[in-house]
Image (spheres, helix red, strand yellow):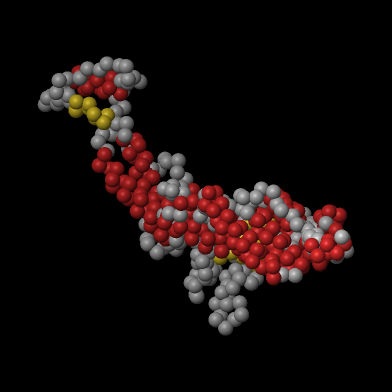
Amino acid sequence: MSGIDDSGAAVLGVGGSAVPSQLMELLACDGIEPGSPPSYETCKTIYSYHPMGAKMAEAPIEEAQSQEREITIPGAPEDDLKQAFMDEWARIGRTGADDIIKNLQVMKRVYGISSLIYGSPDVPTNEPVPLEKLHEIDLYFNILDPLNTAGSLVLNQDPNAPDFQKPQFLRVANHDYHPSRAVIALNEAPVYIEWTNSAFGFVGRSVYQRALYPLKSYIQTMITDNAIAEKAGLLVWKMESPGSIIDKVALAFGSLKRAFLKGAKTGNVISIGLNENIESVDLKNLRDAAEFSRDNILKNMATAAKMPALMLNEETLAEGFGEGTEDAKRLARYISRVRVEMNPSYEFMDKIVMRRAWNPEFYRSMQRKHTDYAAMPYETAFTQWKNAFRATWPNLLVEPDSERIKVDDTITKAAIAAVQVLAPLLDPESKAKAACWLAEVMNERKLMFSTPLELDYEEIASYVPPQPMAEPRPDVESSHE
């Protein structure tokens, strides 16, 4: 009804909040104190529902994968091999190898340990998948969390055992997996006789373990934000007291004036008494305290997770990676360490992708295209390519093109000077090697030379410069006369 006064005191109802009940239970749990270990279910709740849960687990991995690895295969048809490798890398497992590795690393950070397995329905899990048939098999890739592998990845605590605190045996739902078909990732090194609740073993620990208390405190800042948002539009009407005797007429008149005030908006006119005043709730004193509390909570979470605080604060680098500021350098060092931890899973996937990309059918096309491989067996060529394969991460501190051109120019000039000094001292074959080496140095400077320089080593080695014609001597001419 329009005559009802609904301007009573506001009440913040947490129980009816849209925040999932699991997250509210985390806030209401008085047993969570600094140093409390999170359980498997708590880690799942934080990752699934907490606003900072996914960021703490995913942000470092996403930043590490923001650049593609630089692949080189010297002494091979590099462009063809790289293209075939990257095509298979992008489609393997129907999601691509990058997503498979990301999911493995994220689950590792969430629980403290995770596993990646691959296989085929036609090959028993306790047997290795034949490498020579990887290109013919429809492979599947699964990411396992600690609940899937509970009981098999507890880790041996005998200091005299060869597998002391090393993951060796993987068993999933009564199925044993051959070691060649799995890679196990731990978040941090295991501590002797230190049980990890979230991982069901003496293994690594969740990224949330040290940050559990500030993660709980962060939820309180969300409730504070909600309360401030609800109060921000509240108007306070300072009115004169109607006197000691308040009758129904005075109450009705006051209710009517509040209704008029509530419905007033831009373009309307409202009248109040000479000594009355209308203003909004003064919340300016809350800003410093609220921001101070939230910033400290985020810093505590970042410190507990051994992450740069700017990754959680959504702060942007003042100058960017290219300027090499201290923040950029600190973040680059952190991401470099994350990439080192990811290398075993990349090496695991590299071997599988090589076999599928450089298969016998692909090799036959290489034999037709490159005559050097016409008489070479497939396994010999594949072994050469695999041993020559190198994949390195580019530097996050990327220099601008202007600076890179200066560096390339210096390197090119130094290479030319070296060849000029050595050329008079070399035999024809060595000169050909020096010329081809100089061409390779120049071809690597793609910012300076867009078209590669291709030289024929055999032609240069067998080349004999023409001798200049001798001028006739005066005494010989006079004798003829």
Task: Determine the residue positioned at 40% across, 43% down.
Answer: 15
**Percent position (x, y) of residue 254?**
22, 22
Check the picture and name the quadrant holding the N terminus: top left
Viewer-nearest residue: 424 or 387: 424
Is 231 located above or below residue 57 in the figure?
above
Tell me where residue 380 sits by quadrant.
bottom right
Task: Determine the residue positioned at 38% across, 43% down.
Answer: 14
Judge from the rendering whether residue 22 lies leftward or rightward of residue 437; answer left or right.
left
**Percent position (x, y) of residue 359?**
80, 58
Counting labels gives 0
Can residue 118 be seen in the rendering of this structure? no
Check the picture and name the quadrant holding the C terminus: bottom right
Going by the picture, which residue comes out furthest to the bottom? 160
Can residue 271 be seen in the rendering of this structure? yes
**Percent position (x, y) of residue 24?**
42, 49
Task: Determine the residue positioned at 65% across, 63% down.
Answer: 420
Viewer-nearest residue: 229 or 353: 353
Is 80 located above or below residue 16 in the figure?
below
Judge from the rendering whether residue 123 lies leftward or rightward of residue 68; answer left or right.
right
Task: Determine the residue positioned at 32% across, 17% down.
Answer: 267
Viewer-nearest residue: 399 or 105: 399
Going by the picture, which residue comes out furthest to the left? 244
**Percent position (x, y) of residue 199?**
54, 64
Tell me where residue 259 sits by quadrant.
top left
